Amino acid sequence: MKTKSLLYFILTWLFVTGCVRDNSSEFQDILNDVSIQGVEERYENVYVGHPLRIAPTVTTAYGTDLSHLDFYWITYNKSNYSHVDTLAYTKDLDIVICLTPGEHYLKLKAFDRLTGVFYERETVLNVVNDFTNGLLVLAEEKNEAILNFWVPGRNEVIHDLYGKLEGGASLGKNPYKVYFTRYTSELASEVIVMCQDEMGGKILDNTTMSYKRDYRDLFFGMGKDVCVPQAYFRSSMREYLIDDGLVYDRAVNSNPPSMQVRPAMSYASGEYEIAAEADFGDNSQAVSRMVLYDNRNQCFYTLYDITSAFLTTVRNTSGMKYVKGGYFDPDNVGMRCIYANIYSRSESEAREYAGVFVDETGTRWMLRLGIGFWVEGASPNRYLKDLGKVKVEDPTFQQANSYACSAEFPGYMFYAEGSKIYAYSILGGLAWPIYDFNVSQESDYVIDHIELEREGLRLWVAYRDLKQTVLPAGFAGLKIQTDGGLSMVEDVRHDQLADRIVDFESKY
């Protein structure tokens, strides 16, 4: 039995090795007396469920007579040469793609029965599905959460994606946030849909966007009866789930990530309430550690030790240096935070953040701080420092219902008030209108939410047309231009999609 197993292993290795090695340095080469042309070096955006047709030109020393050749097309996973599959036994390939999303090697092999020699041509297929790259749009329709998906290549919106895939099943009620968590493994990556309906929403398969498990499964065995999901913050070694104001550590320095979170972290003074809109991470380049803000005790926590189950304020965090700037005390800010995000990132990994804070009178302030973990050339290279505190006098800033900033547009914060988008200079302290949706009397728009595209140049805007009695909500993508000043041009727009749209998330 062992001899047979060994023989099978050797034959399989020889077959796979023979299939995958192609040391040709040129795309068009002639192997002995057979030439294979008409196969591209790479095929991008090959969609699952869509046809793929390749008709190569094959010539031999016998001219166009191919009767002595046997053809077959094989494919295998590019990353580890696994999942070898034969797609066709013909010279021309004409199939419907049923491969998993990702990069695959595709090879045409021709076997000459007269000489016993194989000839081959190799290419790469970048297989995608409609859900591989695009924009997740979380919305509400008839008191039910729905997940729409914008396909950028075709500028189309797939409506109620989850309902279509799961036979009309519901994601939940009172939709709140949607997150895409990507890991090195496609199987481990997932989409988290948060609904504040006690059940908490669903976790979806990254590839198929179908049901994977319930949100509340993250708390399995903890006796948690009611879920109030609020945020999901990421660092390179840990991910932190905010639920009902508490922070739960999810150890992800393994792949796949942990199926459950750890018990809620504790604070020496007792109760706390993490600000769900205050993200002091970096979605594009994950930070090595995490900073959180407590709206109840109105202080910053520095999670320097990723193994700790305790929250510590900045001055009390061993290994983290507080650099006093004189603008505010991070251990006693005295205000609530309603929004914060990164607005500047340097090559040395130093990052600066801007936050909108509200004092006891309801007045909004702009606070700035610098956060660094192991910053190259900095002394200290692990620090938190206060950089500024300004009361923003502009009434539109004080009344805004949504804010957005990112390192893609350093020095700026965008906000929405009524039907208008405004730009605010973080360092200059000036605010001005930059885009208005109410350009005619035929519509009456109000903006509900704005969000900057991940590593992109768009501002995503969720709005409602109050003159529409059915499905008043839609969204637009505003391309931000910086040449000759700051401006916005609408290049994506889809109306009447839902009763309201609550959140966006880039899937990449």
Image: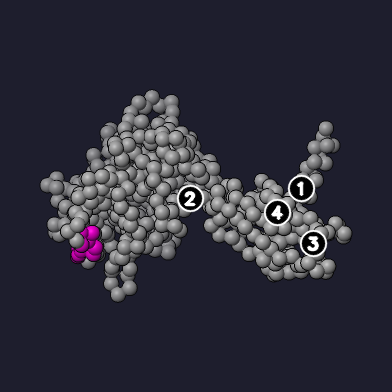
| Magenta range | 430-439
- Amino acid residing under circle 3: Leu
Say whether disc 3 or disc 2 marks the residue closer to the N-terminus: 3
Residue 172: x, y in percent?
35, 34
User: Image point 69% across, 63% down: which residue?
Assistant: 56
Q: Select label 3 or label 2 by which is in front.
A: 3
Q: Which mark is residue 66?
A: 3
Q: Amino acid at mark 2?
A: Asp
Mark 3: which secondary structure?
A: loop
Of discs 1 and 2, which sits in the foreground? Answer: 2
Residue visible at 15% across and 59% down?
394
Q: Nearer the viewer, residue 353 or 438?
A: 438
Local secondary structure at mark 1: helix
Image marks 4 and 1: residues in contact by CB distance under 8 Å: no
Q: Callout 4: helix, strand or loop?
A: strand
Mark found first going from the N terminus, 4 or 2: 4
Q: Which residue is identified by label 1?
A: 13
Point out the tag, 1 or 2, that comes first from the N-terminus: 1
User: Residues under labels 1 and 2: Cα distance?
Assistant: 35 Å
Q: CA distance from mark 4 to mark 2?
A: 25 Å
Helix, strand or loop status at disc 2:
loop
Residue 386 occupies quadrant: bottom left
Identify the residue at image location x=41%, y=59%.
455
Residue 27 lies in magenta, yes or no?
Answer: no
Q: Amino acid at mark 1?
A: Trp
Question: Residue 73 got which mark?
Answer: 4
- The reply to whether discs 3 and 4 touch (Cβ–Cβ < 8 Å) is no
Q: Residues within 10 Å of mark 3 (few under 14, many from 20)?
A: some
Q: Position of residue 34 (x, y in %)?
A: 79, 66
